[in-house]
Image (cartoon, helix red, strand yellow):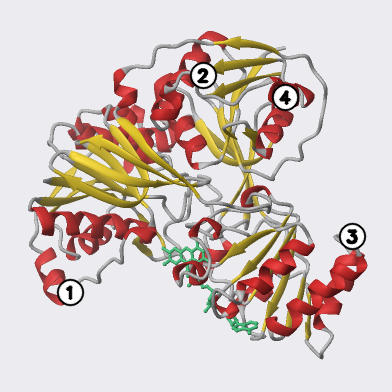
Amino acid sequence: MKIAVCVKQVPDTWAEKKLRVDTSTLDRESADGVLNELDEYAVEQALQLVEAQGGEVVIVTMGPERASETLRKAISMGADAGIHIVDENLAGSDAVATSAVLAKVLTGRDFDLILFGSESTDARMSVIPAMVAERLDLAQVTFAQKMEVAGTTLTAERVTDYGFDTLTASLPAVVSVVEKINEPRYPSFKGIMAAKKKPVEIFSVTDLGLENALVGAGAAWSVVADFADRPPKAAGVVVTDDGAGGTAIADYLTTAKFI
Amino acid sequence: MADVLVLAEHHESEIRKVTFELITAARGLGSPVVLWLGPGLGDTESAALASFGATKILLAESADVVDHPVAPGAEIVASLIASVQPAAVLVASSADGKEIAARAAIKSGCGIITDAVEIATDATATQSVFGGSTIVHSKVTHGTPIITIRPNSIAASESAATAVTEKISMVISDSAKRVSVTTRSVVEKGARPELAEADVVVSGGRGVGGAEGFEVIEALADSMSAAVGASRAATDAGWYPHQFQVGQTGKTVSPALYIANGISGAIQHRAGMQTSKVVIVVNKDPEAPIFELADYGVVGDLFTVVPQLTEEITKRK
Ligand SMILES: Cc1cc2nc3c(=O)[nH]c(=O)nc-3n(C[C@H](O)[C@H](O)[C@H](O)COP(=O)(O)OP(=O)(O)OC[C@H]3O[C@@H](n4cnc5c(N)ncnc54)[C@H](O)[C@@H]3O)c2cc1C
């Protein structure tokens, strides 16, 4: 089985995130870049499938030069190879352009499965897997909390607002996983050393046969008009329970007309 | 006035509140045309949609939209973008909603904005990003704006209209039927309101200590007709079902009132509740970061504070 896992470098979840005044895009310089933690579950899932059934795991990322660290980090969990699309023309690309680039690089490589995390912790749109499935005309099985592959049949549980749906599809398929699906491993020392020698293919936008004019901020199909920090919330009142803490909250709620 | 296409969010015949919020938002942009996918639309439902301003209901009853997730819906939305030429397409920020919007955007060559909390009459969308710390105004510049709206962000208001229902029979392509639903598991939510759309949410975390501890949380919730939420620590431990997890990888809620009990306020939890209008905190650790969000907080043991609060509320009602 040949599996691609698409990963993204994001600012550390714990870091304060800001937009840049000049470009209205996420300020990626100010925070440490880390592997989107939800993508770790996708890498883990791919590794488990290949460990059980044989095959190959290729990590794919689109991002600036320094996203190569994220790519190596994902490979060090145990993957076999990497693909990095790196090009300054990509800066400011929206989801539509990002999905076009990913779809292009994934085309013609005979992947049985293309895995994603359920969302990135910075943009939080959750639309790239669906867009890639649309572009590649593949089965889309997203928000999987459980998945099994038997031969060319994929069975998965898709988390819904009401519970979950059990889905079946034939491979190849695009799958996104939620964090309930597994417990990602930590890269071992051996894995970290081995990752340094794993092959990584590097592509620019034109290498892929795409036009630069189709990507980047200038090509985005939606634009940020303006942005501002939310006015800071007035500090609230915090009291220590003296035996009447519950009554104190009830008083607050009565004043605020909730009761 | 231009038509504005609204994708109804419903579970069989149960219309989700966000649908009325979408129709209300659509009225600001033109005349709301509601697309209903699958079964469940009867006279009562049509009347409810019309009472919020739907001028037309497009009914796509085909079993394909039920038997196959996302892709058939996207195909129908894309074809309506071409035939109706709406000024905008408004969809709920649910898992299905966002993905239908995403695929329709690619099919139709339209820009997409997700998780809007407000829409201006020129279709400029307001988004609240980075856990609510930044307010962004964005606009689609290519094709028909496709905008997904977060439940509970826009107040639904009635505005009676007469809605005609038109059945649309569209042949769904084979490629949109690559994935099939074999079974549907619906977790009983009981009598409480739906988490994502509740006006009041009462949540419990690791501090609740166990499944039995949630009885205290549920009692408070029921005294206020609230929904119950939980932190990941509580759902992972199996104390409360996963469907009720609030946060980055759970539900995003923005109720008028959020009461966090025994929850420390990890960034992933805040990501799902930070836009709540009023936040009440009960936690025995005065240093817990959740207090930073509190409009009113009590440092204390939830097992004494919460039952007392429940009793007071019941008394005062
Ligand atoms: C990829 C990823 C995704 C995640 N997604 C989510 C998500 O969607 N939602 C989410 O919630 N978390 C999520 N998390 C987990 C998150 O990081 C925290 O671990 C989690 O929110 C902690 O839950 P908690 O606040 O209930 O527990 P803790 O952090 O352990 O806090 C318990 C709190 O209870 C208080 N307490 C204890 N006993 C009492 C008592 N008797 N009375 C009053 N207070 C008491 C303590 O003082 C403490 O502050 C995610 C993490 C990762 C890595």
Residue B177 in the image, given as x and y percentages of width and height: 33, 25
> Taking B84 as reference, is B120 left or right?
right
* Residue indicated by mark 4: B44
* Residue indicated by mark 2: B61
* Residue indicated by mark 3: A257
**Ligand 1 contact, mark 4 (Cβ < 8 Å):** no
Q: Are marks 4 and 2 on the same chain?
A: yes
Q: Measure the alpha-carbon separation of dots 4 and 1.
A: 60 Å
Q: Quadrant of residue B114?
A: top right
Mark toward the start of the polypeptide (4 vs 2)? 4
For residue B207, above or below residue B279: below
- Going by the numbered disc 3, the residue's amino acid type is Lys
Chain letter behind tag 2:
B
Q: Are marks 4 and 3 on the same chain?
A: no
Q: Are marks 4 and 3 in contact (CB under 8 Å)?
A: no
**Which quarter of the image is occupied by the C terminus of chain A?**
bottom right
Residue B262 in the image, given as x and y percentages of width and height: 62, 77
